[in-house]
Image (cartoon, helix red, strand yellow):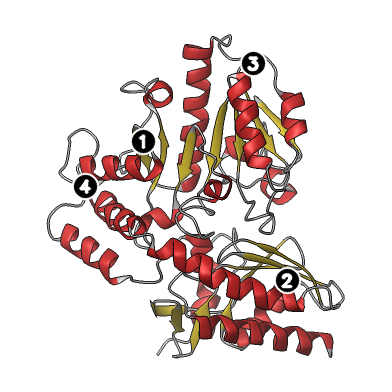
Amino acid sequence: MITSAELIEVSERRSAHNYHPLPVVIREAEGAWVTDVEGKRYLDCLAGYSSLNFGHRHPKIIEAAREQLDRLTLTSRAFYHDQFAQFCAGLGDLTGKDMVLPMNTGAEAVETAIKVARKWGYDVKGVEPGKAKIIVMENNFHGRTTTIISFSTDPEAHDGFGPYTPGFTIVPFGSADAVRQAIDPETVAVLVEPIQGEAGVLVPPDGYLTELREICSAEGVLLIADEIQSGLGRTGHTFACDHEGVVPDIYVLGKALGGGVVPVSAIAANRDVLGVIQPGQHGSTFGGNPLACAVAIAVIELLNTGEFQARAAKLGEVLHGRLRELAGHGSIVEVRGRGLWAGVDIHPDVGTGREVSKALMKRGVLAKDTHGSTIRLAPPIVVTEDDLHWAVDQLVDAVYELQSR
């Protein structure tokens, strides 16, 4: 048997170091649990950054993928295929929008939204060509393409990759007044994560999204909600925007839309917005392919039951109830989040986020750090209540061990 150590050594030697993984090598998984090559089991409390909302290898999703694999996997968009109409109609109904434009990765979906917003600005709003501006938020994370990192405020993502794409105005996250003041006649859109995941699961003040919706409607500006991590059941609603009853002009979706099987992303908007795109202006060979559509249809059908949204809300109360008991007692400074999504700030004197993550890994819990001493918890929605209690117990023990060094 090849060991984890041997596989990690080859991986580090033969791959670019664009990630800093925890030293675990996963071989198989089911539900909320994964197993490494030595046979040790771990509770997955990251869920592929919300890509695995329905757990590893959900039977309905796997069945849809296997059935499609036996028939047709790729046509390219040069032709129609028999899964495309149902996917577009289903996702349109889920979002309440007329049209969808499918791609593959989340970053591609964000790039698509940017292109559509600019095209809408020129064709519909009448902005002078080449002058369109999009307002974005500090501490955002929308991907790592050259255009997207151009408006990142994270030095690791941004620095060293210029020249940068112009056309973006950065304002503080959570301040509707800052957005209002930044809008000018050349502004075509406001791009926002309803909850900032990579920044540490930052939840904006109550009423923030409602105010953004009102401002954008009044000023003739598109509201774009990046729900790639926050959407599709994660926070206890289908979309995080639903917590305030806000409907954006463009939804940006990805991650969980692929059911943990294949990359699937899309934007959804009404015809007066998405109708500006004409043949040849945007596309992808694999975007909207038969396998991706079949998997996404299964995901949409699961969401249409409402079961996962309700489960995330109920279990989220359990998770946050336990975490709130720990906050403010020295080692754990603050806890944030919504539904089955939490950011836990560990006191720097206890250790770094990576040290805490490694201590959790030793105890059979997989989580990931961000921005120093923050731990993100986002287990699959299929996790059990007992699993959640156990995971929080392991966090307590891990922090105690580090504190006692």
- Badge 1 amino acid: Leu
Disc 4 is placed on an element classified as loop
Of the residues under marks 4 and 3, which one precedes in the sequence? 4
Q: Which numbered disc covers residue 403?
A: none
Q: Where is residue 350 shown, x and y percent of the image?
A: 83, 79
Of the residues under marks 2 and 4, which one precedes in the sequence? 4
- Badge 4 amino acid: Leu
Q: Is residue 116 above or below residue 2?
A: above
Residue under the image location 79 percent in, 85 percent down: 402
Q: Where is residue 294 shown, x and y percent of the image?
A: 24, 53
Q: Which numbered disc covers residue 353?
A: 2
Separation of residues labelled 1 and 2 (CA atoms): 37 Å
Separation of residues labelled 4 and 1 (CA atoms): 17 Å
Separation of residues labelled 3 and 2 (CA atoms): 41 Å
Q: Nearer the viewer, residue 37 or 302?
A: 302
Question: Do we see residue 152 in this rendering?
Answer: yes
Q: Nearer the viewer, residue 69 or 242?
A: 242
Q: Which numbered disc covers residue 186?
A: 3
The residue at which mark 4 appears reads as: 74
